[in-house]
Amino acid sequence: MSPLLKRLLLVIPTLLLVSMVIFSLLAILPGDPVSAILGQEATPEAALALRAQLGLDDPIYVQYARWLGGVLHGDLGRSFIDRTPVIDALMQRLPVTIELALGSFAVAILIAVPAGIMAAAKPRGFANYFSTLVALFGMSVPHFWLGMMFIILFAVKLGWLPASGYVPLSEDWRANLAAMCMPVLATGLRESAILMRMVRSSLLEVLNEDYIRTAFSKGLKDWQVVIGHALRNALIPVVTASGLMVSSLLGGLVITESIFGIPGMGKMIVDAIFQRDYIMVQGGVLAAALMVVIVNLVVDVLYTVIDPRIAR
């Protein structure tokens, strides 16, 4: 059985385990969604009636079985607060988060790969020292601080870009790019610093191999050896780091979304936690877990493309 097929078979038990953990943790968290909906002044009779209506007076295993049965039929439930279907809220918020995450990752790749190659090709040159300095700066500066500086400079001082808000790509692509430019750059610049160090260290390790010295001894130019021989073999750890980066971006952009007023999934989950809207939290976290599993599957496929021996 191929490693990829094994991964596919592990998807269902992984998501099942994640759903059980999510449901169990939310059940023991302090706070009552009924109090969040009705307020502290609600009568005990009204609270009992609402708990029965929402099914919160059933045992936890009954609530989980009912929720899981709905999930298997494509129904993630309805929000406790406004009774909006969770699946509809996810369909509105998920594309926003995916756009922000992929845009940030694209910025990181476009900066990190060329900078890492130049730093590794000339380890004692100016490019290496400069890129290392920039990488240390990028890893040291929080992206939310960088985002606020972008707002002050490009939105307040220069007036080039909107300070916050979001316009769907399907409505107006120019307005969409203007709204996403600063959050994508603020997040992507930091991620590029981390990825650049990974590209540099991986490529330096490969460049010390015997077959690379043989390629240099044949009279090949530096860029031919680095790009044609070394880079592909250095990509395995880079692909691993990239997969982890995309996974963390898909689930961890809530600060960026809050700073720039972007209605993404991370902000939706945090707002739902504060409102004790646990059914919305469960659906959002399950969707995030599914995206992480998909990213890991894509990474496994890329492994076999880079090194076909892995698929054997």
Image (tube, helix red, strand yellow):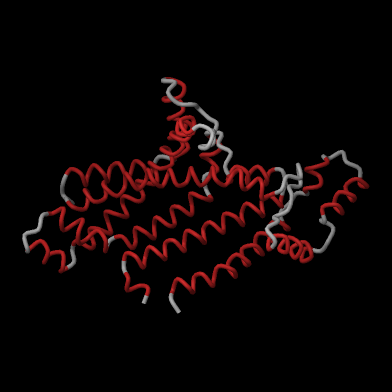
Question: Which residue is nearer to you in this view: 73 or 53?
Answer: 73
Left or right, 98 with reference to 35: left
Q: Residue at x 76, y 47 (%)?
A: 80
Q: Is residue 60 above or below residue 278?
A: below
Residue positioned most to the right: 45
Residue 158 in percent (x, y) is at: 41, 20
Residue 88 in percent (x, y) is at: 66, 47
Q: Is residue 272 above or below residue 301?
A: above
Question: Which residue is nearer to you in this view: 159 or 151?
Answer: 159
Q: Residue at x 51, y 37 (%)?
A: 169
Residue 131 in percent (x, y) is at: 26, 44
Left or right, 96 with reference to 105: right
Q: Quadrant of the N terminus?
A: bottom left
Residue 240 in percent (x, y) is at: 39, 60
Q: Residue at x 85, y 58 (%)?
A: 57
Left or right, 142 with reference to 309: right
Q: Quadrant of the C terminus?
A: bottom left
Q: Is residue 105 above or below residue 261?
A: below
Number of marks drawn? 0
Q: Residue at x 83, y 61 (%)?
A: 58
Left or right, 221 with reference to 233: left
